[in-house]
Amino acid sequence: MKVLLKNLVLSLFLFVCLAGVIFAQNFPVPVPGDYVIRDYKFQSGETLPELKLHFVTIGQPLKNISGIVTNAVIILHGTGGTNKQFLGRQFAEVLFKKGGLLDAEKYFIIIPDNIGHGESSKPSDGLHAKFPHYGYHDMINLQYRLLTEKLGVNHLRLVMGTSMGGMHSWLWGEMYPDFMDALMPLASLPIEISGRNRFFRRMILDPIRNDPDWQNGEYKTQPVRGLTTAIYTLMMMGSAPLQMQKQAPSKDAADKLFDAQVKQRLATTDANDLLYQVDASRDYNPQPDLEKIKAPLLAINSADDAVNPPELGIVEKEIKRVKNGRFILLPITDETRGHGTHTLPAIWGNYLEELLKQTEKKD
């Protein structure tokens, strides 16, 4: 009887494992890794004795006869994000599957957790407000070092990013103009953080810093009042009115959704980490050097994005300075999700396909 029960448990275990494997077969299993850099010096002059960059890769790198990697793609997350936002059904199972635009059997996909995010080094690890004040240029330099020093990638087929990652994509084209074949910034503008975008960020930064419970970053428990106000701002700016109305068509439904979202975000957000993540944009301004971008660049925004509102007309103006630049403004539809449209390749994938075909190289 014991043997029968043991075999039954084993069979159930194997079935569960097999089901997980079958589900994962839509695209190869991501391989996690860490890169530790010693005594890294930031642009601020601050240093970190040991800096960890966490990342995942999917697929394998391929080199041509000259030793140049031909199939590497780096995908960059937004403020507060991690690699995990690209590993779900809406993104990975659309792009990375067999036959997908970024089929992981053909491409070598690299998705880092930027410094200050996810499983990479961040203030909440212990340094709190004594953590070095990193900026976007530091983040991109670290991405470059991860590629070249840890992964042996000497060229990128594509740089693609969402929100903050979209802003990083513009800077990648300027800082390392010969390193990639194509650039695809999503949900971003190629100018410094200004206007309502800067207001939006101050509405996150100031309530936390002005909360007495923040204690200059040395709090023992989260400064709930300031952090809650910051979360209110994030929720409003990142939402899409059409979708929110569908989700919450009554007062009671809206209250329930609101309370649930605030509770969930409070449980998963550290105040110092959020401060650093938002403040990192202070050195972002690709506008003066747009002419340095050599690779074909396709920028995509959505018309219902409150963070990058279309009425500003900024990308339409600045894209003319990018030699091989193109801009697409997605109209509002029942499928768009405001700022979050950037993570829905089902909506903009046809433009990615055009960019990949345009920049395809024949050996």
Image: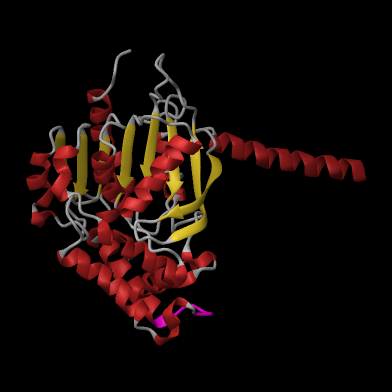
**Residue occupying the far right of the picture:** 1
In the picture shown, does residue 127 fall above or below 213?
above
Judge by depth and name the residue closer to the eye, 128 or 49.
Answer: 49
Residue displayed at 33% across by 57% down: 135
Image quadrant where one finds the N terminus: top right
In the picture shown, does residue 57 fall above or below 107?
below
Residue displayed at 23% across by 62% down: 241
Judge by depth and name the residue closer to the eye, 30 or 50.
Answer: 50
Image quadrant where one finds the C terminus: top left
Helix, strand or loop: magenta stretch: loop
Q: Position of residue 272 (x, y in %)?
A: 43, 70
Residue displayed at 35% across by 75% down: 255
Give, as a single range, the part of the protein colored magenta: 219-225
In the picture shown, does residue 298 fall above or below 51?
above
Relative to 248, 304 lies left or right:
left
Relative to 213, 174 lies left or right:
left
